[in-house]
Image: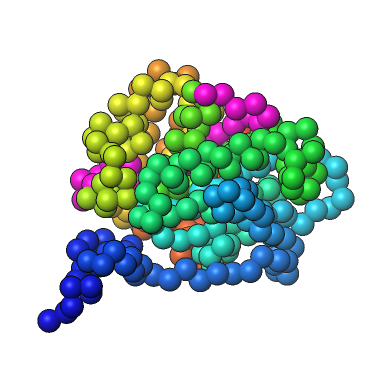
Amino acid sequence: MASNTKQVTHDFPPFFNVYKDGTIERYLNTVYVPPGLDTATGVQSKDVVVSPETGVKARIFIPKIDGSAQKLPLLVHYHGGAFSIASAFDTNGTNYLTSLVSHGNIIAVSIDYRLAPEHPLPIAYDDSWAALQWVATHSNGSGPEPWLNKYADLERVFLEGESAGANIAHQVAVRAGGTGLAGLKITGVLAVHPFFGVKQHDALYKYVCPSSDLDDDPNLNPEVDPNLKKMACKRVLVCVAENDELRDRGGAYYGTLAKSEWRGRVELYETLDGDHCFHMFSDPNTEKVKHLVKKMVDFIYQ
């Protein structure tokens, strides 16, 4: 029989389990990919510290620059993984954003927020909000990161994420509308296969966010959020996938926005025969991924 210290008290596959002694073990190890030049696309990336106090970092991606002084739209990306796995520096995210930045001719900043359960929610939300505030410090061209000062158009900022990252992007947009954020303009939100309230995930969410009231939690259920109408952007693209178990919740999120008092425009895009976050785990040259990326780029430039 296993010792007390190796007894599992909570198990949330495929994300993590918790042992009786408090040890947390993740099912998947994040594979770190160093930043640099992607020779196939000309996209460059670098890692920066967003907050020395919390240790939050980010990875910045810029496309191949042709010498033009024109500034490019900025995409702020929040990765998925049930708030508990993955990273802004892993293989999947790096490959995906390299492709998106190259095809879209945009700048991207991927936020490496602190993970639950070691850092329970709302820490990921707060880190993500603080990161957007950090981005806003570049509005006058004298922020701490030269690439953002030189290349990013802070009048065209898009918040984007997949799964839990889409949830974060939504919440950051709502917070920006409620509290205000000088220095940038959030033009749109791209919510890809968004994670909100689904009964089979409630136990997981309750564990990573012990303070949550679940159905009455506006972070989990936007329909009960009194600040939804204040969401900062004017456009939202909700992307769902036919075979995704969260598809219906993504559709419900679209419906919530469409009937709310928020005075923006929401669009729903579905990938047929697609699985949850397929674009993060597939070759970026597959037709399904290329179609999704094109839709996202079209949304940014419309």
Q: Quadrant of the N terminus?
A: bottom left
Residue at x-position 37% and y-position 49%: 120
Determine whether 211 is above or below 287 in the image.
Answer: above
Dividing the picture into quadrants, the one containing residue 157 is top right
Please say whether residue 132 is visible from this viewpoint: yes
Q: Position of residue 69 (x, y in %)?
A: 85, 42
Q: Position of residue 160 (x, y in %)?
A: 52, 44
Count of numbered tags: 0
Identity of the residue furthest to the left in this view: 1
Region in magenta: 179-202
Residue placed most toward the observer, 65 or 149: 149
Determine whether 129 is above or below 293 in the image.
Answer: above
Dividing the picture into quadrants, the one containing residue 97 is bottom right
Residue placed most toward the observer, 199 or 279: 199
Determine whether 72 is above or below 33 in the image.
Answer: above
How does the figure colour the protein chain or chains?
A: rainbow
Query: Can residue 195 be found in the magenta stretch?
Result: yes
Query: Can residue 128 be found in the magenta stretch?
Result: no
Residue placed most toward the observer, 156 or 132: 132
Q: Is residue 56 left or right of residue 61?
A: left
Please say whether residue 100 is visible from this viewpoint: no
Residue at x-position 68% and y-position 47%: 106
Q: Is residue 163 left or right of residue 50?
A: left
Q: Quadrant of the C terminus?
A: top right
Q: Position of residue 124 (x, y in %)?
A: 45, 46
Residue placed most toward the observer, 212 or 4: 4
Q: Is residue 126 left or right of residue 14?
A: right
Residue at x-position 39% and y-position 28%: 257
Q: Position of residue 296 (x, y in %)?
A: 55, 45
Residue at x-position 23% and y-position 74%: 6
